[in-house]
Amino acid sequence: MSIQQSCIEAYRAHKNLKLAAQEVGIPWQTVYVHLRNAGEPVIGDKLRYGSDTDKLAARGEQMFASFVPEAHNSNSGKFQSKIDFLVQGYGVDVKTSKLKLSHKACKQRRWAFSLKKQEMLADFFVCFCLDEVGDQLLMTLLVPGELIRRYQTISLSERGGKWADYEISYNELRSFFKSLPSKQ
């Protein structure tokens, strides 16, 4: 077996450059070069090896994929793709947040979602509002991309606010996207 094929197999098994490098016995940078030369997507496994923020994002993406199984996961072929999912030609970016205190002096809690790179690209944003621990889905928002083109973040108090107008049951996501005409 060639070194390139060994790199591919090790990376597919681990979805982590450093672990693949340890298995093959070469530096991770060299593994990366072999993977890129072979056209192998280097996407990583955010759920297993990512930061807490990456893990939360990956969890939201998993939830969306289970609620809308027809959605094409753009992250499966490219690490940190510009849009998380394509559904009938519509770009969907998934955001996930845990309920947190607004600030130490205030007892009001909120969810905050960063839209910084996708606000100009996504047709829709699906925002999953989780409890403080991140175990339970408390609310789902479906926001048309055009409505938040000028925002870099949105914040929603647990008491509500203007973004609460876009609440949708997670059970309705699939039927919503199925009802849309295909976008070319």
Image (tube, helix red, strand yellow):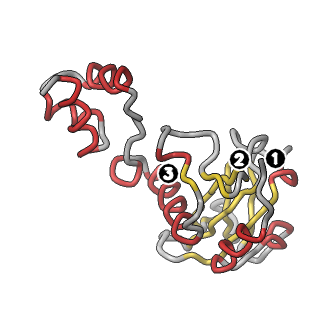
Using the image, tell me which numbered label, if any, was put on residue 115: 2
Report the side of 162 relative to 172 (left or right): right
Q: Are marks 2 and 3 in contact (CB under 8 Å)?
A: no
Q: Secondary structure at mark 2?
A: loop
Q: In the picture, residue 60 is in which quadrant?
A: bottom right
| Residue that appears at 80% across and 72% down | 164
Q: Secondary structure at mark 1?
A: loop
Real-space Cα distance between discs 2 and 1? 7 Å
Q: Which residue is mark 1?
A: 151
Residue 59 x/y as whole percent: 48, 61
Neighbours of disc 2 within 10 Å: few (<14), some (14-19), many (20+)? many
Q: Is residue 40 above or below residue 161?
A: above
Q: Is residue 140 above or below residue 38?
A: below
Exactly how many numbered labels are in the figure? 3
Residue 174 x/y as whole percent: 65, 72
| Residue that appears at 30% across and 22% down | 34
Q: Is residue 92 above or below residue 64?
A: above
Q: Which residue is mark 3?
A: 53
Report the side of 26 relative to 148 (left or right): left
